[in-house]
Image (cartoon, helix red, strand yellow):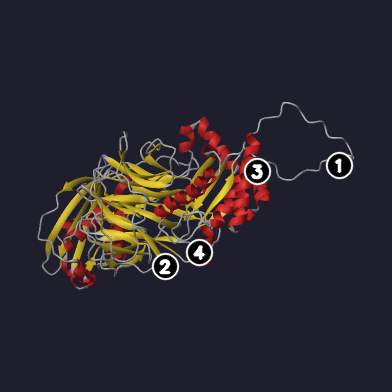
């Protein structure tokens, strides 16, 4: 209590200082990734989701990336040759963890030479049981940046299927690997890419009645993990802005639950709205122009929309009861949200100006935390009666349950709308972890995090 | 707690409130005659303005009201507890306090934050209805973030669906 009081006093004295006191050092981002070779447009092998298991047997050989000259680079202390192996390892892990392919990585394969990258030595690879071959190279440029090339070959046809290259800052070398994994994945499945993206989530430690909850970010494969807040105050429910420049999240830093918008570049944060009322559930519009938040006034929670650059908030719901959350359709025209206006939690769709709200969930259980797929064709939600994650169409049809944990909640979509991440809470211990599942419900896996994790929020493909 | 006791408490709280508002009499009563040697005042325990003093005065069971799953209505048992709290806060008009709203773990995080806020407001509104000024009462929701019972069973969840009154200054 004394702490709270001191906090409150400090807030009056120096609101800005208090607002920032839970924040760590700002994070230096690595800069842009430049595409130097255009992907060749070929006929995609088209698979529907129900056929995804057919890809599981597709063997892909991914030997180390070659280098023209093994030179020093800030990206790897052992030079560009060692970096080439690391690139292939990252691609192998991406494709393996996705559950769709059977990749073999560089540690079990011979190393191709630099000239072989665009002229594979076919006999070397033909008896390894792989239908596909990935080759690539890494070259240190005079400006200190790296060029990474990525090639996909069909072993049976002995043909190049696709190639692309990127120039990256040394600190961004993993992004080149993710882009190569995306290129292979997209070419073989006909789906949009998703590996080159990031995840914001809440890192959890400590006992169940006194959990420390910190805002953290990481790449889609868990690498480049960073804590944003120190853990002095509870942080919850983050969301990346579509351009990855900001994070909105809930913090108790002033003693009350409030939504803040954190600027990753400057390391400063501001309240989403100037109000003494508690605010929850931040969401960005797909174009980044608006932030949705939910605000309780005298115990009644409604959804508001405010320009992300600041301005006058507009209230979008006015039903008595709890209206909360909200997720935009990809074209920005509609919002799916959660409301208990009918008694229990159910999912509703309204126009993005708040007009014409109508209930879409009638599957018998409670519908919570709806999230519109980036493809627009599905809405993921928490069944808050059985505590499983499911999907349905935007009109509420074709409901399918995808997970079976004791308590699974808070789905978030991969950038391509093919994989759903969520968090799973263990009975009794209260320990939470991040999981992901594809739309068949077959390929489920836990995401490794340094400590426990909850409230995942998957951002779009990195700009 | 039955209705008669509740009504009695309501009356008592009304009287206490009236007593607080009474102006000082113009003529002071005569000083008390010293019939016994004054006993030295020993340390009298918790001071006014601490959570301990509040808990000792109203009884720990009366500091927390409980709710059914997804509900936030104040039932007879809750109102009896809140009347006891009301008497205390009428007696100490200098005190501001906080009502913390909580939910059990069997709810989604964001909904539980809103639900905790609704529960805290239900308790606050009751206290306001029996005469405690709204500006003395802060509400805060912790959703499912601060359970008191740690198990994952009906009994633990029932203990966690609560609005707890806490003295802040």
* Residue B56 shows in this picture: yes
Q: Nearer the viewer, mark 4 or mark 2?
A: 2
Task: Tell me the distance, in whole angstroms, between the alpha carbons under discs 3 and 2.
Answer: 41 Å
Task: Tell me the distance, in whole angstroms, between the alpha carbons under discs 1 and 4.
Answer: 53 Å
Q: Nearer the viewer, mark 1 or mark 4?
A: 1
**Marking on residue B39:** 1
* Residue A30 shows in this picture: no
Of the residues under marks 3 and 1, which one precedes in the sequence?
A: 1
Q: Which residue is mark 4?
A: A429
Residue A439 or residue A81, whichever sits in front: A439
**Disc 3 element:** loop
Circles 3 and 2: CB atoms closer than 8 Å: no
**Disc 1 element:** loop
Task: Tell me the distance, in whole angstroms, between the alpha carbons under discs 3 and 1.
Answer: 26 Å
The picture places residue B60, in percent across and down from the top left corner, at 64, 54
Q: Which residue is mark 2?
A: A406
Q: Nearer the viewer, mark 4 or mark 3?
A: 3
Task: Tell me the distance, in whole angstroms, between the alpha carbons under discs 1 and 2.
Answer: 62 Å
**Disc 4 element:** loop
Q: Which residue is mark 3?
A: B50
Q: Residues within 10 Å of mark 4 (few under 14, many from 20)?
A: few
Q: Chain of mark 1?
A: B
Task: Tell me the distance, in whole angstroms, between the alpha carbons under discs 4 and 2.
Answer: 12 Å
Q: Chain of mark 3?
A: B
A234 to B30, vertically: above or below: below
**Marking on residue A83:** none
A281 to A273, vertically: above or below: below
The picture places residue B95, in percent across and down from the top left corner, at 61, 39
The picture places residue A173, in percent across and down from the top left corner, at 30, 49
Give the residue at x 17% y 46%.
A36
């Amino acid at each position: 209590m004394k702490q709270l009081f001191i906090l409150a006093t400090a807030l009056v004295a120096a609101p800005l200082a208090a607002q920032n006191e839970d924040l760590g050092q700002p994070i230096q981002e690595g800069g842009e990734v430049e595409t130097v070779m255009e992907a060749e447009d070929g006929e995609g092998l088209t698979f529907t989701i129900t056929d995804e298991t057919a890809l599981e047997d597709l063997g892909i050989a991914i030997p180390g990336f070659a280098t023209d000259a093994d030179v020093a680079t800030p990206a790897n202390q052992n030079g560009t040759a060692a970096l080439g192996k690391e690139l292939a390892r990252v691609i192998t892990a991406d494709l393996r963890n996705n559950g769709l392919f059977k990749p073999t990585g560089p540690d079990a394969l011979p190393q191709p030479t630099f000239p072989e990258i665009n002229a594979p030595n076919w006999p070397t690879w033909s008896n390894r049981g792989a239908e596909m071959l990935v080759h690539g190279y890494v070259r240190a440029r005079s400006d200190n940046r790296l060029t990474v090339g990525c090639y996909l070959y069909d072993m049976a046809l002995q043909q190049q299927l696709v190639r692309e290259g990127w120039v990256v800052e040394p600190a961004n070398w993993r992004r080149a690997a993710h882009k190569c994994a995306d290129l292979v994945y997209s070419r073989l499945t006909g789906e949009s890419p998703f590996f080159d993206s990031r995840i914001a989530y809440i890192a959890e430690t400590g006992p169940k009645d006194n959990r420390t909850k910190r805002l953290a970010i990481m790449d889609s494969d868990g690498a480049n993990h960073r804590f944003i807040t120190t853990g002095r105050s509870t942080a919850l429910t983050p969301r990346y802005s579509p351009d990855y420049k900001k994070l909105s999240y809930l913090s108790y830093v002033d003693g009350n639950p409030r939504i803040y918008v954190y600027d990753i570049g400057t390391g400063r944060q501001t309240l989403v709205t100037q109000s003494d009322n508690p605010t929850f559930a931040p969401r960005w519009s797909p174009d980044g122009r608006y932030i949705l938040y939910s605000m309780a006034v005298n115990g009644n929670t409604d959804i508001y929309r405010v320009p992300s650059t600041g301005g006058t908030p507009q209230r979008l719901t006015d039903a008595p009861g709890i209206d909360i959350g909200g997720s935009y359709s990809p074209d920005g025209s509609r919002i799916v949200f959660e409301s208990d206006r009918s008694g229990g939690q159910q999912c509703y769709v309204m126009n993005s100006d708040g007009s014409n709200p109508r209930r879409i969930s009638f599957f018998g259980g409670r519908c919570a935390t709806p999230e519109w797929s980036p493809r627009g064709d599905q809405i993921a939600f928490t069944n808050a009666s059985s505590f499983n994650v499911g999907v349905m169409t935007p009109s509420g049809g074709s409901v399918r349950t995808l997970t079976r944990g004791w308590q699974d909640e808070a789905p978030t979509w991969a950038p391509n709308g093919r994989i759903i991440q969520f968090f799973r809470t263990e009975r009794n211990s209260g320990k939470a972890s991040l999981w992901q599942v594809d739309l068949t419900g077959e390929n489920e896996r836990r995401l490794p995090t340094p400590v426990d994790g909850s409230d995942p929020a998957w951002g779009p493909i990195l700009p | 707690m039955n209705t008669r006791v509740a009504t009695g408490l309501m009356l008592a709280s009304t009287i206490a409130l009236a007593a607080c508002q009474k102006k000082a009499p113009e003529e002071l009563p005569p000083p008390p005659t010293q019939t016994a040697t004054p006993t030295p005042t020993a340390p009298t325990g918790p001071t006014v303005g601490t959570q301990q003093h509040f808990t000792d005065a109203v009884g720990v069971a009366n500091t927390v009201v409980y709710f059914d799953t997804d509900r936030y209505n104040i039932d007879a048992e809750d109102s009896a507890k809140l009347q006891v709290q009301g008497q205390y806060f009428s007696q100490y008009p200098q005190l501001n306090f906080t009502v913390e709203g909580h939910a059990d773990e069997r709810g989604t995080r964001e909904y539980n934050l809103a639900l905790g806020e609704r529960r805290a407001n239900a308790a606050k509104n009751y206290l306001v209805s029996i005469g405690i000024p709204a500006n003395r009462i802060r509400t805060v929701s912790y959703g499912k973030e601060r359970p008191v019972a740690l198990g994952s069973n009906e009994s633990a969840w029932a203990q966690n669906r609560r609005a707890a009154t806490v003295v802040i200054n």
